[in-house]
Each structure stands twice: as structure tokens, then as C-alpha cells.
Image (cartoon, helix red, strand yellow):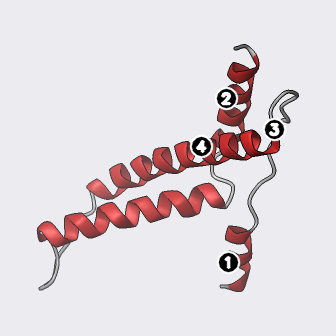
Amino acid sequence: MAAFASVLAAPAAPAATAKGASDADRAKAMDTAREFESVLLSQFTSVMFAGVKTDGPFGGGPAEDIFRSMLSEEYGKILARSGGIGLADSVYREIIKSQENI
């Protein structure tokens, strides 16, 4: 469990640096890129869980739907923080590139 926590605590370094952007702008761009990847991964996990049936005396209902939604969101955040699928770096580079072209 400690190894899992250390992976979550160590964010990936940005793959590209912006020439004209300040450190605050780069940090904000990277946060935005990671958030985008987190939302996308949350959507992936919610679709994945859509086919899983609940059973037993406490399964199903509106509370189960709310719980699964929150669980998918947290899974997305965890996956993005632990390296994700590499989308955050690409989105970060595109954000910086579009800001340099303004």
C-alpha cells in the first residue's frame, strides 16, 4: 500500500517547457491538462462500470448510482495522478503552444 501511495504522491514532470510563459502559467496549464485527463479517465471508468450489475440485499438504487459516479470520479483522479495514459503531457504542450501563438 505504501508503494501505491508513493506513486500517487509523485506527479509526473511536464514534458515540455514554455519559452515565454511564467512558472505560474506553466503550473496552471499543467493542472488544467491533468484535470482534463482526470475527467476523461473518469468517463472511461463510468462506462466500464455501467455493465456491472449489483445484487444482494443492499445493491442497486439511486444511492448506488451516486456512489458509482463518485467512485468513477475518484478513480479518474487517481489514474491521472499516477501517470494516466500520457494525455496530460500532450494537452499541456498544446496549451503552451496555443498561448505562444497568441
Question: Mark 4 or mark 1, which is nearer to you?
Answer: 4
The first of marks 2 and 3 along the sequence is 3
* Residue indicated by mark 4: 32
Mark before the other along the chain sequence, 1 or 3: 1
Which residue type carries mark 4?
Thr
Instruction: Give SS at disc 4.
Output: helix
What residue is disc 3 on? 22
Instruction: Tell me how far mark 4 sits from mark 2, CA to CA.
Output: 9 Å
Q: Nearer the viewer, mark 2 or mark 3?
A: 3
Count of number-bearing discs: 4
Query: Where's residue 96, x and y in %?
Result: 73, 28
**Is residue 41 left or right of 12 when viewed as pictured?**
left
Q: Amino acid at mark 3?
A: Ser
Mark toward the viewer: 4 or 3: 3
Residue 95: give its label: 2
Residue at x-position 42% and y-position 54%: 45
The quadrant of the rendering that contains the C terminus is top right
Upstream in sequence: badge 4 or badge 2: 4
Q: Which residue is mark 1?
A: 5
Question: What is the distance, in whole Å, between disc 4 and disc 3 at their CAs?
Answer: 15 Å
Answer left or right for 49 relative to 85. Answer: left
Q: Along the line of sight, which residue is nearer the eye, 25 or 61?
A: 25
